[in-house]
Image: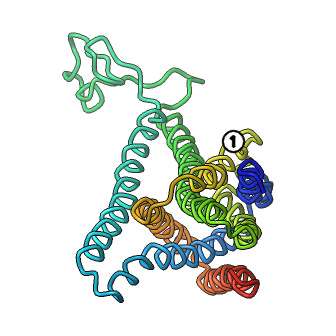
Amino acid sequence: MSPLGVAALGAVAGLTIFLGLPIGRLRSNAVGLKAALNALATGILIFLLWDVLSQAWDPVDKALSSHQIGPALGQGLLMAACIGLGLLSLTYVDRYMKRRALALASPIRPPAGPDGAAGTHGGPHAGTHGAHPAHGTQPAPHGAPAVGTATGVAIVAATEVESRAGARRLALTIAIGIGLHNFAEGLAIGTAAAQGELAFAILLIVGFGLHNATEGFGIVAPLSGTRPSWGYLALLGLIGGGPTFLGTVIGQSFSSDIVSIAFLGLAAGSILYVVIELLAVARRTGMKTLVAWCIFAGIVAGFATDAIVTAGGA
């Protein structure tokens, strides 16, 4: 098969991630359904974290088995550094994005009075006629909306905006983590094809394609009930699945354990961050039994797809 044909199959393997994306368009806002979807995605990502860490550690393990302490130490340190970079960078980026979103959706403040103070009327006699003037305020005109009510509504609106923005950020983070992982998988496909192991490369494509179908669901689970646009879902699919194609193209002409370890380490760190976030979401639902069962189901689904690939000889 020509390099172009292998690259095309790599693209197909990556684009199967789109099969799970339509779930993100579910209309239901039922708390139980959202808790189940998030927990199922958590289980899939826990399996994926184990899978990524196993692949990243494999070259280190082989070097240690051959008593190559220097290379093993260097690869191990690289793996640790990339895991830390993937985890901590997303932590700080998310903190910045939350602060920015809250600032943009800040509650409505009372109008400033003549003296520049919010909600005050600092006339020359302010503070001289009892308790109310002491605060420099005047009763609202009949029929005018109460400032407290307007502020309360604005706070609720800001909370809803931040909730939706948080769901979009989490879905994007999942897509980035899976994309890094899929780039490393693409490298494996391209390397196998370049070494003449075409049957093995095709088997990898089928197996990774099956994996990606479940990963697409994991990406959009936080978006259930928010009705994201098809364009945004397509963007998430390209971020998560597109790197498989890029990795396949690059892997046919270039292969390096160092590069593979670096991308797998970054993927592991970002996936670990997402798992932490999803577990926090699961705890807030208060549905411990449902969450436990769905996490278990997600882990089983991950191992089941991996078992199919292994049984096929990969």
Quadrant assignment for the C terminus:
bottom right
Q: Quadrant of residue 15?
A: bottom right
Which residue is found at the position 58% from the left and 72% from the top?
45
Q: How many marks?
A: 1
Rendered position, 257 above or below 21: below
Name the colouring of the figure: rainbow
| Local SS, label 1 | helix
Q: Identify which residue, 204 or 222, lies in the foreground.
A: 204
Q: Identify which residue, 8 or 112, lies in the foreground.
A: 8
Which residue is found at the position 45% from the left and 69% from the top?
272
Q: Quadrant of residue 85?
A: bottom left
Q: Is residue 174 left or right of residue 31?
A: left
Q: Residues within 10 Å of mark 1 (few under 14, many from 20)?
A: few
> Is any atom of residue 238 visible in this view?
yes
- Give the x, y percent position of residue 271: 50, 65
Amino acid tagged 1: Tyr
Q: Is residue 270 left or right of residue 73?
A: right
Which residue is found at the position 35% from the left and 18% from the top?
112
Which residue is found at the position 63% from the left and 82% from the top?
299
Quadrant assignment for the N terminus:
bottom right
Q: Which residue is mark 1?
A: 232
Q: Identify which residue, 139 or 158, lies in the foreground.
A: 158
- Give the x, y percent position of residue 262: 40, 61
Rendered position, 92 above or below 202: above
> Is any atom of residue 24 visible in this view?
no
Q: Identify which residue, 177 or 253, lies in the foreground.
A: 253
Rendered position, 120 above or below 282: above
- Give the x, y percent position of residue 296: 64, 86
